[in-house]
């Protein structure tokens, strides 16, 4: 009785067309530009905030609207805003980071209290008070657009968006410390409202824009 042949048939070589398609796909993937990481986005967004603040300060100094001594008198509030802006930006864009975002909210509250408390009675202004709110919103457009673009690369997260919006809104608050000498009540009403409006706008727009990634 003969022994049955139990050997398996040799696999067929892949078709040349399939090999060509697989090779083309691998080459295309290798040639595609790598998406920048969150640290690169952090540098871009933080640079926008710092750059706008420095540009406004430079223009005001050039036209004589403020002096070096005036800037020195606002050192505490300016330092508080710069710190909270950078920390909030970092907390909003880094992966995960729930605790750092909650900490950022506390820092924003402290910073807002500082810029109100150090203002005091202030000085009268010949311009309507709402001009500050409008100018702060206008200045906040650029950093807000940057963070909205960066948030599209991440999984939707309302807290992340709010913190990113608050970070972008520090730009307008910086302008208020550089260009406005009105009272604490004015700051609390017309400056902080613009800051909050930027945060709300970023959160709302981010929730409506379709994300390009769902990375944490």
Image (cartoon, rainbow, N blue to C red):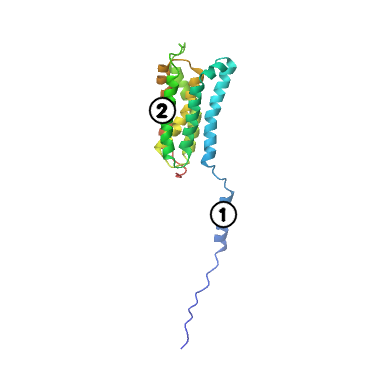
Q: Which residue is mark 2?
A: 109
Instruction: Name the residue tied to disc 1.
Output: 26
The residue positioned 57% from the left and 58% from the top of the image is 20
Among the 4 quarters of the image, the one containing residue 209: top left
Identify whether 148 is placed above or below 76. Answer: below
* Residue at 50% across, 24% down: 78
Please name the residue shown 56% across and 25% down the image.
54
Q: Is residue 61 left or right of residue 199?
A: right
> Separation of disc 2 and disc 1 at Cα?
50 Å
Residue 88's x, y, as percent?
Answer: 46, 33
- Return the x and y of residue 142 as percentages of the image width and height: 51, 29
Question: Across the whole image, how many numbered discs are drawn on residues?
Answer: 2
Instruction: Indicate the position of residue 149 as horizontal and vertical percent values.
Output: 49, 36
Disc 1 secondary structure class: helix
- Viewport quadrant of the C terminus: top left
Q: How would you rate the neighbour count of disc 1 (Cα within 10 Å): few for under 14, some for 14-19, many for 20 or more? A: few
Q: Can see residue 205?
A: no
Q: Horizontally, is 133 left or right of 56 in the view?
A: left
Depth order, front residue of 62/75: 75
């Amino acid at each position: 009785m003969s022994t049955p042949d139990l050997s398996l048939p040799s696999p067929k070589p892949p078709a040349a067309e399939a090999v060509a398609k697989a090779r083309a796909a691998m080459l295309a993937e290798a040639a595609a530009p790598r998406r920048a990481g969150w640290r690169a986005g952090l540098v871009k967004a933080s640079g926008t905030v710092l750059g706008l603040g420095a540009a406004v300060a430079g223009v005001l100094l050039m036209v004589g609207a403020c002096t070096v001594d005036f800037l020195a008198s606002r050192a505490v509030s300016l330092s508080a805003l710069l710190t909270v802006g950078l920390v909030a930006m970092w907390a909003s864009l880094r992966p995960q980071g729930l605790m750092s975002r909650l900490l950022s909210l506390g820092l924003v509250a402290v910073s807002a209290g500082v810029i109100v408390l150090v203002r005091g009675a202030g000085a009268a202004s010949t311009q309507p008070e709402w001009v500050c709110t409008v100018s702060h919103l206008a200045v906040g457009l650029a950093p807000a657009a940057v963070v909205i673009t960066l948030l599209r690369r991440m999984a939707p997260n309302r807290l992340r968006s709010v913190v990113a919006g608050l970070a972008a809104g520090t730009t307008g608050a910086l302008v208020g410390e550089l260009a406005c000498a009105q009272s604490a009540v004015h700051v609390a009403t017309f400056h902080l409202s613009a800051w909050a409006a930027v945060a709300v706008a970023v959160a709302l727009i981010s929730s409506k824009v379709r994300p390009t990634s769902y990375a944490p």
